[in-house]
Image (cartoon, rainbow, N blue to C red):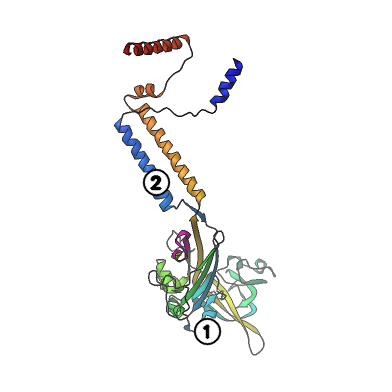
Amino acid sequence: MAASGCRGLFLSAFDYKTEKYVIAENKKVGVLYRLVQLAIIGYLIGWVFLTKKGYQETEESIQSSVMTKLKGVSLTNTTNLGIHLWGPEDYVIPPQGEKVFFIITNFIETPNQMLGYCAESKKVPNGHCRENADCPAGETVVAGHGIKSGYCLKRDRNSTGTCEIYGWCPLNACFVLPREPLLRSTENFTVYIKNFIRFPRFEFSKSNVLDTADDRYLKNCLYDRTEHPYCPIFRLGDLVSWAGHSFRDMAVAGGSIGILIEWNCDLDKGYDNCHPHYSFTRLDMSSAANSVTSGYNFRYARYYKNAADQTYRILFKVYGIRFDILVHGKAGKFNIIPTLINIGSGLALMGAGAFFCDLVLLYLMKKSTFYREKKFESAKNDKSSVRKMIEDKGSEIQIQEDGS
């Protein structure tokens, strides 16, 4: 008996077992089930495969190189500097053509500075003094312009003065920023932005420059979203206006513009369908109006020697627009593995739809008790249930004999 039982248990492992289905003739639940199925199929086809391209293997680790070159000249005539012609080597910082560059649009100049002794600026708190003891010799003025000499310079005994310093004198504290940008013509200058990208997983490379043998194309074209999307030459005024701001207003105190180049490439459509998309935004804006954080400026100097072989310099506090070029991208190509994974996920959602409809049928309908009795059977191994099974079987045999 034990051997036959083990043999039966072993052979039962090779039996195929399927689920038992109960057909509930309820039109409301049936319609709900079909609507859930259609929603899942629409999500799978419309969103997963068509919109998100779930059948593709993707890569977002884009490798990028950006080179820039600016063209244009501007003429200024100031009291201290006189007539001066500004070329790209003067107003572009740094001049090497990097993906971050600064254009000078306005400036304050302090001419003929020489090393010597003069009073610290009143705008520097650490330079204020009442007596010589407040200016220890050799101490650096915090956020100031030089080294304290040990003397306090003031008008009279009862007034507050400033420490005498050793530094580049005279200081530039008394100069006022011009209300109109001195380099007005920078609005019409052009920048050549050359961008090379590569997706290493797919061995795919491309440039934002039109692949043509006509060398006149880059000399005559100007970027346009529709007519010249592969022309890499941009007018500076257009870059600022596309970001939603006025170039003239921004050129007075400076600012920062972000140039975003996006490469979203569907490699299943071929090389020619991978295009750069440009967007522009101002980066130095704050939520508060007239915030001190907006604008952009810094100082630099040009050094010279006079006839007496003494070194002097012209200090410039320059205001202008900083351009940051940001490159992002994603490439996709068909692969069977993500395709199967997304199909499997869709089939699993189908099962979730059936589970939801079961909950509605068994717990939310008026006849839920009736449906539960039909769906679930209780099997008890006691004498009464065995006797009932025998009686039912005997009844079936009797009915068959009477029928015969």
Indicate whether 33 appears above or below 362: below
Picture quarter with the C terminus: top left
Visible in this render: residue 294? no
Which residue matches tag 1? 81
Indicate whether 403 appears above or below 230: above
State the residue at coordinates (59%, 70%): 161
Q: Residue furthest right?
A: 138
Residue nearer the viewer, 357 or 122: 357
Dot 1 surroundings within 10 Å: few (below 14), some, or many (20 or more)?
few
Q: Which residues are magenta?
A: 262-273
Tell me the amino acid under the disc marked 1: Leu
Assign a secondary structure to mark 2.
Answer: helix
Q: Residue furthest front?
A: 404
Which residue matches tag 2? 43
Q: Which mark is residue 129?
A: none
Visible in this render: residue 238? yes
Tell me the amino acid under the disc marked 2: Tyr
Indicate whether 291 appears above or below 310: above
Indicate whether 117 appears above or below 347: below
* Displayed quadrant of residue 391: top left
Residue nearer the viewer, 123 or 57: 57
Could you tell me residue 215's position as x and y percent? Answer: 47, 80
